[in-house]
Image: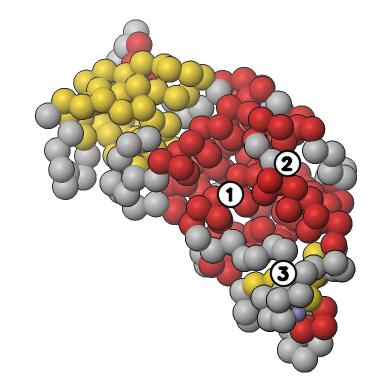
Amino acid sequence: MIVSSQGIILKIFPYSNTSIICNVFTEDRGKLTFIAKGIRKPKNPLLSILQPFNLLEFNYYYKKNRAMHLIKEADIVFSFNHLRSNLSTILIGSTILNIINRLFEEEYPQEIVFRLTYKTLNQLSSNMEHSKKLFLFFLFHLSKQLGFMPNINRCNSCNVLFEYDVIFSLSSNSLICSNCNIHNSLDSDLVISYESLSYLILINKTHINSIMDIKISSLHLKELFHFLIAFMNSNINYMHKIKGIKEITKIYHAE
Ligand SMILES: [Zn+2]
């Protein structure tokens, strides 16, 4: 059956002398693996189209429960290629694709996460100077969609509304107030300033198109980055090992 889907290439690798295999995040079917046969030949236009950082329209031979689907043709719907002109945005953009590739199984539709990925890449390519904020937005909303973002307004233990610095408690995998932390604090617990938390609450309420209007200092961006990675890592134990995360940490540490 020939079907068509819009999708973003997550990873691409050569196969045999002339073909390529790619993992694609499609809007309607989730992650799929495609093979494009015979395209690594001179002057084959498909080779330049089949690249990450494009939103593509694929026509392909779909067979249920097949490990790979054969691409018939592909066209660029929209390109995020601008983000290639800056090292930080290339790194953040590729890491977003790596996270999606590691996180999801094949044929598990994730339409909201697809839109989040598409919109984040789109904003990264047009608002490069806001890349650190955009990555936080992506991580936060991804965790929300996966269903494990903790309550950011109230203490998980005593339910008091946060008004001061809070603690991310690894043992309870949640945010708690400093009163509740006194009895069972661990070295691994992370303190998040109330100011940083307020920015996270703001990111939660703000549409991605308006994220540029929020002004956050490097210090708070760094603090939130560490919280979101520590938090995601306690839910997805390979998170910190995903290619790119280590290098991105350096971006948040640079002024
Ligand atoms: Zn409490």
As drawn, the residue found furthest toward the bottom would be 183
Categorize mark 3 by other alpha carbons within 10 Å: few (<14), some (14-19), many (20+). Answer: some
Categorize mark 1 by other alpha carbons within 10 Å: few (<14), some (14-19), many (20+). Answer: some
- SS type, badge 1: helix
Q: Is residue 141 left or right of residue 162?
A: left
Residue at position x 54%, y 67% from top?
A: 235
Percent across and percent down for residue 82 are 62, 20
As drawn, the residue found furthest toward the front would be 160
Q: Amino acid at mark 1?
A: His
Q: Amino acid at mark 3?
A: Arg
Q: Which residue is mark 3?
A: 154
Residue at position x 32%, y 36% from top?
A: 28
Q: Which residue is mark 1?
A: 141
Residue 87 in sight here: no
Q: Which residue is mark 2?
A: 133
Does 135 appear above or below 201? above
